[in-house]
Amino acid sequence: MALWLLWLLESAPGSAPAPQPTVTILIWHWPFTNRPPELSRDTCTHYGMASCRLSSNRSLLASADAVVFHHRELQTLQSRLPLDQRPHGQPWVWASLESPSNSRGLHHFRGIFNWVLSYRRDSDIFVPYGRLEPYSGPTPPLPAKSKMAAWVVSNFQERQQRARLYRQLAPHLQVDVFGRASGRPLCANCLLPTVARYRFYLSFENSQHRDYITEKFWRNALAAGAVPVVLGPPRATYEAFVPPDAFVHVDDFSSARELAGFLVSMNESRYQRFFAWRDRLRVRLLGDWRERFCTICARYPYLPRGQVYEDLESWFRA
């Protein structure tokens, strides 16, 4: 009874907690463009985060609660750090969704950033490329399959592990290759329906690093309705995000030929088991930078004050 009365008192009109002050996040340079999207004062409410304001107006530097710097623009010198204008104690956020192999110049940023926003699970602000969410609606029908395996690749380099593995697989497995590297580019709206016709998709990351699982897994395979054949971090990392029977990991096989044999000889009953998760879960793609930056506000009250990454490069390459 006491607990029930306490609940009534807490939920009574006028007893709501005081509104939280608005947290202002300044984006110093919007990722990959000189033209940031329109940012209204309620942008973050669309992602379930109130009292959070995003802005790309650099005149707010002196008053912003945190400032975000995206690494690509720092790396290419499109943007520079306003070190001489930095207010005392203002948290600066280093943001990147690229792998360490594609992140140059990190040694320039010793002792500058307080927080990290990245796909790494141990980041201060963790922003994966996607996730599975509970779903109670009808199970979506699986697209009809007429072909074996697909791979979409734009930057094919022979030195990469994924290129070597593809060369080893190709004699034993029919793989249709799309993307700029193959001369068969796919339009943005063509990718998912094209991949949906295939039983398997080669979700090969361009480099293998801790927690580095990109849209090649979430969008190109799972969202398209193909079984991902993954080359990336260890199996245990994938299993932290999806059921263990939702993908095929190349590390489970002693050779590319053995992997190909497993895929080619698979019967329909075994194949369908890869999609059991679709009865209760669905893919949520997290590709909007506005949502990613709004996540800072959700984490803001819990982020460590006074923390400094003295050696950002060593941390990121660990």
Image (spheres, rainbow, N blue to C red):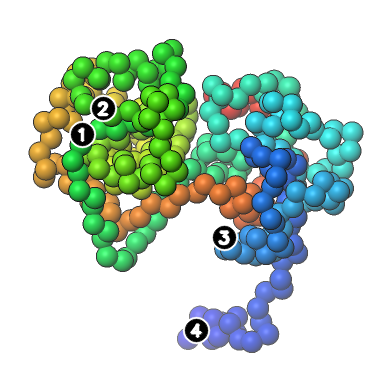
Of pointers 2 and 3, the one earlier in the residue sequence: 3
Q: Position of residue 158 (x, y in %)?
A: 41, 13
Figure quadrant of residue 100? top right
Give the alpha-carbon distance from disc 1 to disc 4, as whole Å. Answer: 59 Å
Q: Nearer the viewer, mark 2 or mark 3?
A: 2
Of pointers 4 and 2, the one earlier in the residue sequence: 4
Give the alpha-carbon distance from disc 2 to disc 1, as whole Å. Answer: 7 Å
Residue kind at label 4, given as amino acid type: Trp
Of pointers 1 and 4, the one earlier in the residue sequence: 4
Of pointers 3 and 4, the one earlier in the residue sequence: 4
Q: Nearer the viewer, mark 1 or mark 4?
A: 1
Circle number at residue 47 = 3
Residue kind at label 3, given as amino acid type: Tyr
Residue 229 seen in render: no
62 relative to 242 in the view: left or right: right
Q: Where does label 1 land, which residue?
A: 148
